[in-house]
Image (spheres, helix red, strand yellow):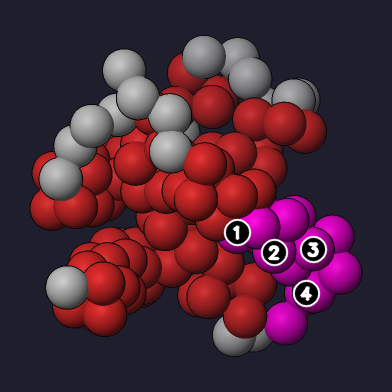
Amino acid sequence: MVFRWGYALATAAVFCIELAIAIFLNDPLIRPHVGDALAVILVYLGLRTILPWRPLPAALTALGVAFAIELGQLFHIRDLLDLSDSALVRFTLGGVFDVKDLVFYTAGAILALVVEAARRERIA
């Protein structure tokens, strides 16, 4: 296991942005769509903070987590696990399946890879 401070700081920053969106915004664009893309980026950054993975495996894993959560919504996993009363679970797992969310999760993974490639290009 490794620990990368740059990724840790980026993870914290994206988490704060996600939290601010969840607390202060209730609009039809940023909260549901930008928030979904940022959620995948948050998981990606968290993975890159502690694991020595290359960008593509980390992005695909983050995307897989997001897809799994979304599919859990389709099958009402919160209700099946009797976790519907938990605010933390509602915040983390959401509640309503929407195929558009899969598009924005994918956009978040692609954006993470694009930024990573640009960052590596700038360093090289």
What secondary structure is the magenta-colored segment mainly?
A: helix
- Which residue in the protein does label 4 denote? 26
Residue found at x 23% / y 44%: 58
Amino acid tagged 1: Val
Give the extent of the magenta segment.
13-27
Q: Residue furthest front?
A: 124
Q: Is residue 45 above or below residue 41?
A: above
Return the x and y of residue 57 as percentages of the image width and height. 13, 44
Distance of label 2 from label 3 (alpha carbons): 5 Å
Give the number of the mark in front: 2 or 4: 2
Q: Nearer the viewer, residue 52 or 91?
A: 52
Distance of label 2 from label 1 (alpha carbons): 5 Å
Label 1 secondary element = helix
Residue found at x 70% / y 64%: 17
Q: Earlier in the sequence, mark 2 or mark 4?
A: 2
- Which residue in the protein does label 3 denote? 20
Taking the magenta stretch, the answer to whether it contains residue 16 is: yes
Q: Is residue 20 above or below residue 80?
A: below
CB under 8 Å between discs 2 and 3:
yes
Amino acid tagged 4: Asn
* Residue 34 numbered tag: none
Say whether residue 98 is left or right of residue 19.
left
- Which residue in the protein does label 2 denote? 17
Distance of label 4 from label 3 (alpha carbons): 11 Å
Res. 95 visible in picture: no
Return the x and y of residue 114 as percentages of the image width and height. 24, 76
- Which residue in the protein does label 1 denote? 14
CB under 8 Å between discs 2 and 1:
yes
Q: Earlier in the sequence, mark 4 or mark 3?
A: 3
